[in-house]
Amino acid sequence: AEQPKPYPDCCRRYMRGKLPYSAIKGYSVQTDTEMCPINAIIFHTKKGKACANPALKWVIDFAKTQPL
């Protein structure tokens, strides 16, 4: 069987620091499926995307205030 190719939009590592809430236009959730190596929250900003650790308090707090 052919090895699955990594999904090109996967987060492979987490960003450092914290995004200002005002910069975040939306977010999506990545789970560590066969396609992606880690669980992450993908924040969508004007400049692109940022991958955050879903266990961090500021990430959890933001997700609670902004349901998908």
Image (cartoon, rainbow, N blue to C red):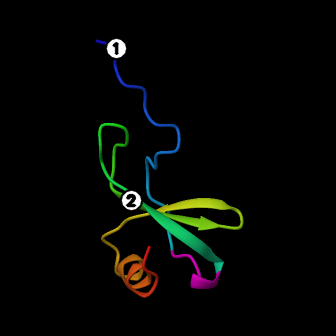
Q: Is residue 52 magenta?
A: no
- Mark 1 lies on residue: 2
**Can you give x and y, in whole percent of width and height, for residue 52 in the image?**
44, 65
Amino acid type indicated by mark 1 = Glu
Q: Residue at point 55% right, 61% down?
A: 50
Amino acid type indicated by mark 2 = Ala
Q: How busy is the neighbourhood of tag 1: few (under 14 within 10 Å), some, or many (20 plus)?
A: few
Alpha-carbon distance for marks 1 and 2?
Answer: 26 Å
- Mark 2 lies on residue: 40
Residue closest to the eye, 10 or 16: 10
Callout 1 touching callout 2 (CB < 8 Å): no
Q: Viewed as shown, does residue 62 lie left or right of 44?
A: left
**Can you give x and y, in whole percent of width and height, for residue 23 in the image?**
65, 77
Q: Residue at point 30% right, 48% down?
A: 32
Q: Residue at point 37% right, 38% down?
A: 35
Q: Earlier in the sequence, mark 1 or mark 2?
A: 1
Quadrant of the drawing holding the C terminus:
bottom left
Majority secondary structure in the magenta region:
loop
Q: What stretch is highlighted in magenta?
A: 18-22
Residue closest to the eye, 42 or 17: 42
**Can you give x and y, in whole percent of width and height, for residue 51 in the image?**
48, 60
Q: Which of marks 1 and 2 is in front?
A: 1
Q: Say which element carries label 1.
A: loop
**Can you give x and y, in whole percent of width and height, for residue 41 in the image?**
42, 64
Q: Say which element carries label 2.
A: strand
Q: Residue at point 71% right, 63% down?
A: 47
Residue farthest front in this picture: 68
In this rendering, is residue 16 above or below 22?
above
